[in-house]
């Protein structure tokens, strides 16, 4: 990846104080946006603090504060629910003991890990050396060392993800500030190992944008071997390839993804089949999780039904029939993805890859029966690339932060002493769900009305498009729109 810091010398840079209504309004407090006759600091070639360097520094600062925020939990002495009262719980530390890493157990061989294999490899690669060192140095706190080693590597991956955003948006570097300054990053960066998959997915998007579809597929496949969701990006690549008659690039990416996923999975699949199955069995049998659409529905059902046999609402019934619920969630997600595909084919202009990727991942989360608190990280870089408008993202962030605090209150209440009414938690969950749906709706609106897309004001076509950038649509796209009596020209650039 070439250094993004040099982009300001050759490409026009977007100014959020002029292009973003929310930031323009805030700028009035300090005198308004920079005028058209002002001297741009970016014109000084010897200036150190360029926009990309400022963004990287802000990411590092946010991650440093994140480490401080989690510091009360690092010693593992979680007495009096300190992990909840200080909002510092992290799976990383808890699973060092729960997965047997503190006893030197090799993931999958000695203990069935609940995550896809690349995450298990990652856990073992850091945990087993720390356990070995702790055996010869009994004075160290192995759990604390493990957490800090993971926090360091995950933070590096988060910085790398910000660098990819900058590389993909050289003309709009300040978009990455949405990621760098996000409270979401502050409170969830090291809750779990999600940044492993996020970084791989982001590098995959960058490779695709650089017209390297095989490498993009390899990276997305590895991301899918860490968390499944990066594989969902292959769907948008397929429909964009169909619309542009460039399916060869998609099949190259698909082949790379299959090879990478199989290379990561097959050793464990053949050697430790039961351990490999653990992730899939857990997801198959897992009940309705807190804060999901189904959890909200079950709460509402309980207001009108007792929950007893014969007096159950639909969500209560699904809660008692998890396998049926699985099919319902899969079906709704597939229908949502099909609708996104139709939108892609009928839109007056070929949508941008990041727009479709955000919609697919958001649809998966909205209809999923599991929505862990750190899953919000999946959406953060994608929404920055898909719709970098501060106002709606800040509203979503507030809702996510409200859910975060309500979630920890609910965890405290699980001990038998309620901290907040159940209705308050359901309200926080609903606001999170609604704001994600609103973001998705705004992205759909800008796909249908591409003149509203601020990224297109800086680029002639999709900066993430790779082999598809600037290519004309297939002739049948215009005929399809005519069949649906849609007006307006079909354009791809």
Image (cartoon, rainbow, N blue to C red):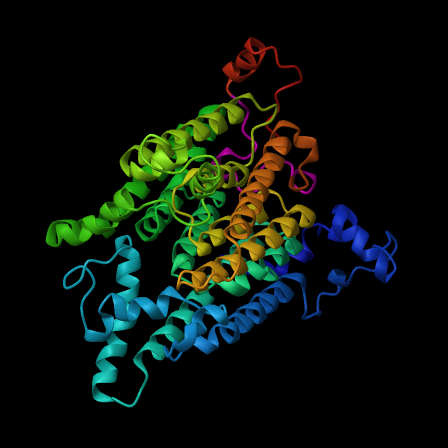
* Residue 295 rendering spot, x and y as whole percentages: 43, 43
Image position of 439 (left or right of 360): right
Which residues, given as a range, are shown in magenta?
A: 456-473
Q: Main secondary structure of the magenta part?
A: loop
* Residue 37 rendering spot, x and y as whole percentages: 88, 54
* Residue 246 rendering spot, x and y as whole percentages: 44, 28
Q: Tell me if residue 97 comes above or below residue 223 in the rendering.
A: below
Nearest the eye: 436 or 210 = 436
Nearest the eye: 43 or 458 = 458
Image position of 209 (left or right of 262): right
Residue pushed farthest left?
271
Q: Tell me if residue 279 comes above or below residue 440 in the rendering.
A: below
Nearest the eye: 394 or 46 = 394
* Residue 372 rendering spot, x and y as whole percentages: 42, 53
Q: Tell me if residue 432 comes above or below residue 156 in the rendering.
A: above
| Magenta stretch encompasses residue 95 | no
Pick the quarter of the image with the C terminus. top right
Give the residue displayed 46% in from the left and 58% down from the top. 410
| Magenta stretch encompasses residue 460 | yes
Image position of 223 (left or right of 376): left
Q: Is residue 337 visible?
A: yes
Snapshot quadrant of residue 48: bottom right
Q: Is residue 2 visible?
A: no
* Number of numbered markers: 0
Give the residue displayed 43% in from the left and 71% down from the top. 83
């Amino acid at each position: 990846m070439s250094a993004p810091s040099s982009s300001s010398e050759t490409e026009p840079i977007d100014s959020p104080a002029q292009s973003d209504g929310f930031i323009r309004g805030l700028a009035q407090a300090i005198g308004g946006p920079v005028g058209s006759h002002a001297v741009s600091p970016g014109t000084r070639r010897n200036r150190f603090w360029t926009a990309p360097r400022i963004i990287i520094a802000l990411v590092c600062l946010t991650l440093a504060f994140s480490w401080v925020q989690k510091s009360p939990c690092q010693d593992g002495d979680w007495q009096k629910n300190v992990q909840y009262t200080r909002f510092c719980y992290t799976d990383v530390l808890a699973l060092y003991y729960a997965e047997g890493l503190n006893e030197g157990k090799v993931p999958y061989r000695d203990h069935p890990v609940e995550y896809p294999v690349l995450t298990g490899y990652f856990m073992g690669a850091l945990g087993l050396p720390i356990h070995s060192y702790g055996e010869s140095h009994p004075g160290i706190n192995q759990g604390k060392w493990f957490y800090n080693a993971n926090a360091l590597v995950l933070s590096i991956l988060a910085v790398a993800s910000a660098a990819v955003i900058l590389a993909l948006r050289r003309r709009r570097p300040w978009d990455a500030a949405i990621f760098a300054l996000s409270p979401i990053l502050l409170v969830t960066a090291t809750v779990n190992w999600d940044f492993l998959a996020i970084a791989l997915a982001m590098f995959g998007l960058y490779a695709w944008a650089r017209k390297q579809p095989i490498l993009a597929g390899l990276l997305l496949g590895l991301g899918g071997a860490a968390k499944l969701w990066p594989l969902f990006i292959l769907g948008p690549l397929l429909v964009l390839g169909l619309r542009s008659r460039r399916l060869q690039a998609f099949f190259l990416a698909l082949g790379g993804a299959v090879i990478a996923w199989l290379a990561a999975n097959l050793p464990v699949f053949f050697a430790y089949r039961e351990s490999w199955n653990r992730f899939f069995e857990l997801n198959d049998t897992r009940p309705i999780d807190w804060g999901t659409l189904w959890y909200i529905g079950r709460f509402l059902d309980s207001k009108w039904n007792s929950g007893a046999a014969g007096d159950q609402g639909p969500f209560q019934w699904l809660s008692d029939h998890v396998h049926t619920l699985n099919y319902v969630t899969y079906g709704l997600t597939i229908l949502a993805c099909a609708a996104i595909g139709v939108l892609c084919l009928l839109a007056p202009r070929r949508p941008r890859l990041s727009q479709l990727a955000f919609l697919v991942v958001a649809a998966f989360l909205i209809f999923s029966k599991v929505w862990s608190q750190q899953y919000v990280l999946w959406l953060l870089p994608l929404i920055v690339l898909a719709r970098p408008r501060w106002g709606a993202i800040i509203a979503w962030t507030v809702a996510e932060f409200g859910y975060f605090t309500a979630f920890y209150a609910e965890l405290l209440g699980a001990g038998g002493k309620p901290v907040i009414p159940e209705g308050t938690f359901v309200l926080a969950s609903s606001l999170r769900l609604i704001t994600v749906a609103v973001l998705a709706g705004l992205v759909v609106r800008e796909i249908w009305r591409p003149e509203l897309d601020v990224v297109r004001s800086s680029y002639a076509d999709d900066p993430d498009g790779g082999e598809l950038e600037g290519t004309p649509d297939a002739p049948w796209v215009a005929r399809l729109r005519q069949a649906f009596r849609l007006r307006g020209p079909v354009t791809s650039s």
